[in-house]
Amino acid sequence: MSQVLFVDDDEANLVVCEAAIGDRFDLLTEQDPERALEILRSREIAVLVTDQRMPRMSGAELCARAKEDSPLTIRVLITAYSDLKAAIDAINLGQVRRYLRKPWEPDELAAELRDAIEVYELGKRLRVAEQRARETERVYSIAVMSAGLAHEIRNPLSWVVHNSQYFGSVVQDIKQSLADGGDLRKARQQLSDVEEALADLQLGVKRILDIVKRVEAPLLRADPEVEPVDMGEVVALAIKLVDPELARRASIEVEKSGSLLVSGSSTELSQIVLNLVDNALRALPPGQRSKCQVKIRLVGGDEQVRMHVVDNGPGVAPEILPRIFEPFFTTREVGGTGLGLPISRTIAAQLGGELVAENGREGGAHFILSLPATLPTAGVT
C-alpha cells in the first residue's frame, strides 16, 4: 500500500489524523519537518500532507525542499484562511498539488488522499513504461548498429571470399601444370592474374578494416576524420566491390564532368555508392544483361558535386517511395535488411549533403547524392 506522510508540529493534530484516517491509509506522522525530509529521502512516500504554519519551517518551505528530494511525491498543504496566499503561491510555483482549509474534514482529506495516491500510482506506471521504452530503444539501436555493420561488411567480405576461392583454383592449376611439365609461360600468366586478384583482395580487406575503425571511432575521437576525396575514384572503387554475380545483371556506365572533390571518408562514400548500385542492380531482372543498364553520372560544380544513379528497371511504386529511407523497410522477400538506404542518407547528412530518390521520367529509379564541393589541397589533384 502507498504510504502517506502527515506533518504537523502540533501533536494533537497528528493524533486526530491517526484516529480519523489511520485505518484507511498506510499513514506515517511526524512533528519535525527536518525528520520528515529524512523520511522522504529514505522511503517511498506517495503523498506528503503538511500544515503550513510551523515554527522552524513552514509547510510551503517543506514542500519546496521535498520537491527537490522526492520530486514524484504528491504534496498537499493544509492552511488556515489567513495563510491562503502562501498556499496559492506554493501551487503556482509547482510546490504543491492541492491545498486544504483548516479545519479539514476526515472525508474530505480521505478523498483528497485517494485522488493523490491514484495520481502517484499512475506516475509510477508511466515511469515503468518510460524505462521499458528506453530499454527497447537501446535494444533497437544495438540491432540497427549490428545489422548495419553486417550490411556494410557483407559486400567487401564476399569480394574477399570470391578472390580467395579464385586463388585456390589457380594455385591447383599451376601445381598440376608444373607436375606435368606443362607450359611455364601459362603458369607465369596465371601468377600475374593471381597478383591482380591479390590486390583486389587486399582492397576488400582494407575496406573491412576501415568499417571496423569507423565503428571504433566514436570511442576514440569526437569527430570522424575527413579529407579531400575524388568521387570519381570512389565510384571506381565501389564498382570493383559489387558482388560479381550481381554485376552480371547489367552494364554499368560512368560519366564524369567537372571537379569531383568533396570532403569525407572514401570508405563511407564508397558505401553510399555501393548501396545505390547494389539496389539498382537488384531492381533489374537477371538473365537480360543486354537490356539492363545502370548509369552513374557525376557532375562537379563550384558549390556542389552531384552523383546521379539511374537504372532502367521498373522504378519504385509511388506508395513505397516515401518509405524507402526508413530503417528496416525493405521490399525484398529474402536477404534484405532495409538498412542500406538509411545508412547512406545518414552518411550524406553527416557530410553536409543529402540523398533523395525519385522515379525517372523514362522509368527506373533515380537517386541523387549531393555533397558540398571542396578545393584541392597540396598533393591532391
Image (spheres, rainbow, N blue to C red):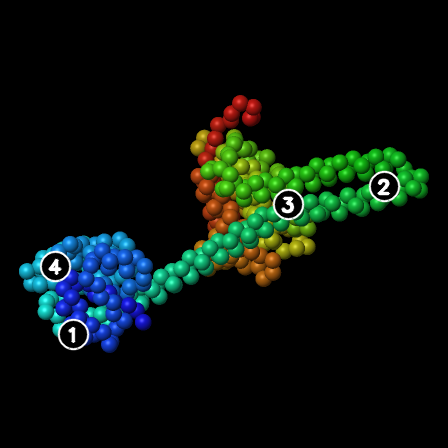
Q: Is residue 65 above or below residue 349?
A: below
Quadrant location of the C terminus in the rendered image: top right
Q: Is residue 357 above or below residue 121?
A: above
- What residue is shown with label 3? 156
Name the residue at 70% across, 37% down.
199
Local packing at callout 4 (Cα closer than 10 Å; few below 14, some 14-19, many 20+) is some
Q: Earlier in the sequence, mark 1 or mark 4?
A: 4
Q: Is residue 302 above or below residue 45?
A: above
Q: Secondary structure at mark 1?
A: helix
Q: Earlier in the sequence, mark 3 or mark 1?
A: 1
Where is residue 149? Give x, y as percent: 57, 49
Q: Which mark is residue 53?
A: 4
Q: Nearer the viewer, mark 1 or mark 4?
A: 4
Name the residue at 28% across, 68% down.
3
Q: Nearer the viewer, mark 4 or mark 3?
A: 4
Q: Is residue 145 visible?
A: yes
- What residue is shown with label 1? 106
Q: Secondary structure at mark 2?
A: helix
Q: Is residue 71 visible?
A: no
Q: Which residue occupies the extreme right position in the image?
A: 181
Circle 4/circle 3 CB separation < 8 Å: no
Out of 153 and 218, give the one closest to the viewer.
218
User: What is the spatial separation of the Cα atoms under label 1 and label 4, in whole angstroms?
Assistant: 20 Å
Local packing at callout 1 (Cα closer than 10 Å; few below 14, some 14-19, many 20+) is some
Where is residue 132? Give x, y as percent: 42, 61
Local packing at callout 3 (Cα closer than 10 Å; few below 14, some 14-19, many 20+) is many
- What residue is shown with label 2? 174
Say left or right for 251 vs 349. Answer: right
Q: Which mark is residue 179?
A: none
Tag 4: amino acid: Arg
Tag 3: amino acid: Pro
Q: Nearer the viewer, mark 3 or mark 1?
A: 1
